[in-house]
Amino acid sequence: MRLFKKLFIKTDPIIIVSGLPRSGTSMTMKMLEAGGIPPLTDQIREADVDNPKGYYEFERAKKLKDGDAAWLPEAQGKAVKLIGALLVELPPKYDYRVLFMRRNIGEVLASQSKMLERRGEENKVDDGTMALLFEKHVRQVEEWMKKQPGLKYIDVDYNAMLSDPRPQVEAINKFLGGSLDTEAMLAVVDPNLYRQRK
C-alpha cells in the first residue's frame, strides 16, 4: 500500500485594501503599486475629478456576494480593493492581509456628498443617520476580522497619512513583510487631493 504525504504549498497572501467609501482606498492601492505590489484591477472604471489618479477597482470582486470567488487565486501576491461589506464574503481557505482605511466620518460624508452632487444624485439619508450606520458597519467588520484565523489586518489612518505619511507607510511595510519601496510609496501621497477636511 502506497502512502501519500499531503503537500502543503505555501502561497502568497491576498492583500486587500478596504474601508468606507471615500476613505483613501484608491490612494493606498496606488501606494502599494508604487511600493512593488501589483494591483488586481480591470481599468473599467476610469479616473475622474473625484479620483483623478484612478479607482483601482476590479469588477468581479463586487460579485463575491453572488458566489463568484473563482478569481481569488489570481489575486494571490497582489492587492485588490474590496468594500468593507464584502470582506465577510471571503472564503476562509486563503491567507488575507487587510489594510483597513480609517478616515474622519465627517470628511467621508462630505466627500461622498460632493461626489453625488457632481453626478446629479442626492443623499437619501441624512448625515447624522449615515454617520451612525457607517460607525456600526465598521464595528461589525472589525469584530468579524478579529475572528478569522487566516486573516490579519492593520488600520491605516487616512488623516495621519496626509499630515505625516512616513509612520503610516513604515507600518504598512512592516505588516506586509518589510520589502516595499517606502520612498516610492511616500511620493504617491498628494496633499492637494485632500479636499474635504474637518
Image (tube, rainbow, N blue to C red):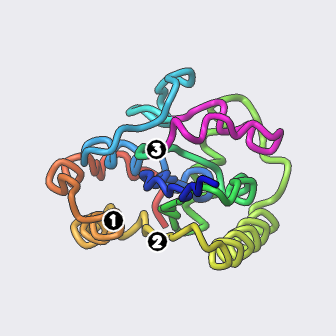
Q: Residue at x 72, y 29 (%)?
A: 120
- Where in the figure is residue 95, as x and y percent of width and height? 53, 59
The residue at which mark 3 appears reads as: 26
Q: Nearer the viewer, residue 100 or 148?
A: 148
Q: Residue at x 57, y 33 (%)?
A: 58
Rounded to the nearest angstrom, the CA distance separating label 3 from label 1 is 15 Å
78 left or right, relative to 80: left
The residue at which mark 2 appears reads as: 154
Residue 131 position by quadrant = bottom right
Residue 52 position by quadrant = top left
Q: Is residue 75 magenta?
A: yes
The residue at which mark 1 appears reads as: 172
* Farthest left residue in view: 183
The crowd level at tag 1 (other Cα within 10 Å; few <14, some 14-19, many 20+) is some
Q: Residue at x 64, y 57 (%)?
A: 93
Nearest to N terminus: mark 3 or mark 2: 3
**Circles 1, 2 touching at the beta carbon (< 8 Å):** yes
Magenta part, dominant SS: helix
The crowd level at tag 3 (other Cα within 10 Å; few <14, some 14-19, many 20+) is many
Rounded to the nearest angstrom, the CA distance separating label 1 from label 2 is 8 Å
- Where in the figure is residue 82, as x and y percent of width and height? 60, 48
Q: Amino acid at mark 1?
A: Ile
